[in-house]
DNA sequence: AAAGACGCCAACCGCCGGCAC
DNA sequence: TGTGCCGGCGGTTGGCGTCTT
C-alpha cells in the first residue's frame, strides 16, 4: 500500500512510517507542539525531513482526524464544494470536520470523480445540493450565535464528540516551544514511547484531562528522555537551540522539584 | 490456481505565498 | 527591494490488496 522504507543520500528515512516513529512524533508534539517542522525531527529523535513529519501529523496522527467511511452527507458536500471551488482540497477539507485535504483528494479521485459522471445517485445528489446548501446556510445562520462551532463554514458536518477535540486542537496549536514544557501543558502517562496506547485512547486522555501533571512521566525520579536514546551532546544538532531545552529543563526542575536527567543537562 | 489489470491511499515532490531580515 | 526560510497546497507516484480473466 505504501512505499517501502528506505534512506535517501542524506540519511533521511523515506517511505512508510513505523509505529515507533508515529509514537515518537505524537509524543513529542503532544508535549512541545510543532514549533518548527524543519527542526522538529531532530529533537523528536526522527530521521525524517520536517515535511514528512508535518504530513504524517496533519494527515494521520493529528487528534480528531477521520479516515474512510464517508457519509452521504460528506460526499454531497465534497461534490458541491468541488463544483464551486475546483481542486481546492484544503478549502474543502476546512468544511468537513476531521477530514484532511489529502484524504478528500484521494476519495474524490477514487470514488466521486467517476461517479459524478456515471452514477445517477451522485447526479441526484448534485441536483439536491443546491437545496441542501440553502438549508444548511439557513441552519448555520440560525445557530451562528449559539456556539463557536457554528462559525464554521455552512457545510460543517458536526459530530458532537469531536467538538472538544477541535477546540483543543486550536488551543494546542498555540503552544510554543518556549512555554509548552513548563506550565499548563498536559503530561501524558507513558511508560515507554514505543508502547503507547492506541491513538484514540491516547488522544482521549490527552484532550479530556487538561492540565494534569502526570508523575508517571517521571521514572525513578528522573525525566525520561524525549525519544529513545534521548538527547546526546555528541549529536551534531545538539547545540542548535539546545539552550532552550536546557532552560526548559531547569524551569521544570525549579518549579516541580524534579531531578532532570543529568544526561540531558550535562 | 495463476497472472495480469485495476483500485485505492499513504507518502513524496515541486511549487507558491507569507514573512523576517 | 532582494533573498532565504518555512509552512502549506495540489499533483503525482509506489506498491499492496482485490478483482477479473
Image (cartoon, coloured by chain):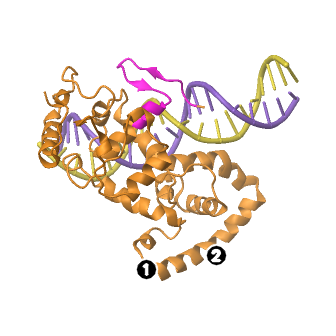
Chain colours: A orange, B yellow, C purple
Q: Nearer the viewer, residue A50 or A85?
A: A50
**Which element is circle 1 on?**
loop
Quadrant in the rendering for residue A119: bottom right
Quadrant in the rendering for residue A146: bottom left
**Which element is circle 2 on?**
helix
Residue A245 visible within the image: yes
Task: Find disc 1 in the rendering and name its residue.
Answer: A146
Residue A34 visible within the image: no
Mark 2 burial class by Cα count in 10 Å: few <14, some 14-19, many 20+: few
Residue C7's spot in the image, x, y percent? 33, 46
Say above or below: A248 vs A121. above
Between circles 2 and 1, the one closer to the viewer is: 1
Residue B20's spot in the image, x, y percent? 16, 47
Say above or below: A98 vs A28. below
Residue A43's spot in the image, x, y percent? 27, 33
Residue A136's spot in the image, x, y percent? 56, 74
User: Residue A8: within the magenta?
Assistant: yes
Direction from residue A2 to residue A114 in the image, left or right: right
Residue segment shown in magenta: A2-23
User: Residue A147: within the magenta?
Assistant: no
- CA separation, marks 2 and 1? 23 Å
Q: Earlier in the sequence, mark 2 or mark 1?
A: 2
Task: Find disc 2 in the rendering and name its residue.
Answer: A131
> For the point 58% across and 72% down, which residue is it?
A133
> For the point 54% across and 52% down, which residue is it?
A66
Amino acid at each position: 500500500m505504501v512505499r517501502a522504507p528506505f534512506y535517501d543520500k542524506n540519511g533521511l528515512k523515506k517511505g512508510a512510517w513505523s509505529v515507533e516513529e508515529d509514537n515518537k512524533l505524537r509524543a513529542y508534539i503532544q508535549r512541545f507542539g510543532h514549533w518548527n517542522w524543519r527542526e522538529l525531527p531532530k529533537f523528536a529523535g526522527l530521521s525524517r525531513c520536517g515535511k514528512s513529519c508535518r504530513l504524517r501529523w496533519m494527515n494521520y496522527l493529528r487528534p480528531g482526524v477521520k479516515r474512510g467511511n464517508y457519509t452521504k452527507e460528506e460526499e454531497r458536500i465534497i461534490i458541491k464544494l468541488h463544483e464551486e471551488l475546483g481542486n481546492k482540497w484544503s478549502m474543502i477539507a476546512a468544511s468537513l470536520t476531521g477530514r484532511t485535504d489529502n484524504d478528500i483528494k484521494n476519495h474524490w479521485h477514487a470514488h466521486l470523480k467517476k461517479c459524478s459522471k456515471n452514477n445517477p445517485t451522485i447526479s441526484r445528489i448534485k441536483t439536491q445540493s443546491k437545496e441542501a446548501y440553502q438549508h444548511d446556510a439557513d441552519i448555520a445562520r440560525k445557530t451562528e450565535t449559539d456556539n463557536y462551532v457554528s462559525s464554521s463554514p455552512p457545510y460543517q458536518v458536526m459530530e458532537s464528540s469531536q467538538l472538544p477535540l477541535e477546540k483543543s486542537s486550536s488551543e494546542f496549536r498555540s503552544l510554543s516551544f518556549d512555554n509548552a514544557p513548563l506550565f499548563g501543558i498536559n503530561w501524558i502517562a507513558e511508560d515507554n514511547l514505543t508502547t503507547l496506547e492506541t491513538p484514540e485512547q491516547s488522544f482521549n486522555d490527552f484532550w479530556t484531562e487538561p492540565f494534569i501533571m502526570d508523575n508517571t512521566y517521571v521514572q525513578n525520579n528522573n525525566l525520561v528522555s524525549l525519544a529513545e536514546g534521548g538527547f546526546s551532546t555528541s549529536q551534531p544538532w545538539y547545540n542548535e537551540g539546545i539552550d532552550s531545552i536546557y532552560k526548559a529543563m531547569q524551569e521544570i526542575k525549579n518549579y516541580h522539584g524534579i531531578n532532570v536527567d543529568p544526561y540531558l543537562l550535562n
